[in-house]
Amino acid sequence: MPSQKVLEQKQQLVADLADRITNSVAGVIVDYKGITVEDDTKLRKELRESGVKYTVIKNTLIKRAADKAGLSGMDDMLNGTSAIATSAEDYVAAARILQKFADTHEHFNVKTGYIDNEVITTEKIKSLAKLPSREVLLANVLGAFQAPIASFARAIQAIVDKSGEAPAEAPAEAAEA
């Protein structure tokens, strides 16, 4: 039987993790066995730089935190070694980084995940991982908005160049009157 102090620490850990899950837009749970300390350090650095929180934690604590956060359907996947990665702002960062890492490391596997408090399958995580980063998507959208304006400006410039002269300005005495 655990002591009261240990029990309180675990309850606080579950409450903190449930709050983290609730306040995140996406998360991924992985089986991290079989990776070296060096690989784990590189992975954690990449996740941290992308604003993703990564924690190795017991399955029972993840299950309790997920239940408290309103996520159900993860129980079958919570076995073996588990770590959870959550992102408060970026929907694809955790999936992209962890799936890329899983593709290059034989024993590292993505188990399950969630988006907006809905559990998703590993197939959906793989699909998310293929999406470009938020910055790339924003750049593409901005490029699409700028394209018509740039085309209009080139068309106006072509008309000016074709006529061979700059547009006439109003005579000075007409402006003074």
Image (spheres, helix red, strand yellow):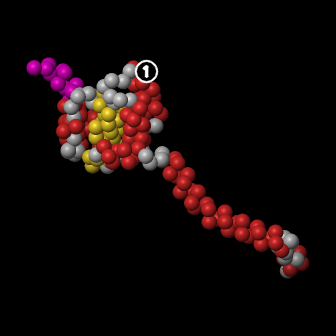
Q: Is residue 76 left or right of residue 90?
A: left
Q: State how many labels appear.
A: 1
Q: Which amino acid does label 1 sit on?
A: Glu
The secondary structure type at the circle numbered 1 is helix
Residue at the image point whose x is 27% and y is 49% from the top: 118
Q: Mark 1 points at which residue?
A: 38
Residue 81 found in image quarter: top left
Identity of the residue drawn at 83% across and 74% down: 163
Residue at screen point 50% across, 51% down: 137
The answer to which of 175 and 105 lies nearer the viewer is 105
Residue 14 falls in image quadrant: top left
Name the residue furthest left: 1
Observer-nearest of 104 and 146: 104
Residue nearest the observer in this picture, 121 or 173: 121
Local packing at callout 1 (Cα closer than 10 Å; few below 14, some 14-19, many 20+) is: few
Range of the magenta residues? Answer: 1-11
Q: Does the magenta stretch include residue 117?
A: no
For the question of whether residue 110 can be seen, the reply is yes
> How far across and how far down the image is residue 65, in percent?
23, 37
The residue shown at (38%, 41%) is: 95
Q: Position of residue 13 (x, y in %)?
A: 25, 30
The main secondary structure of the magenta stretch is helix
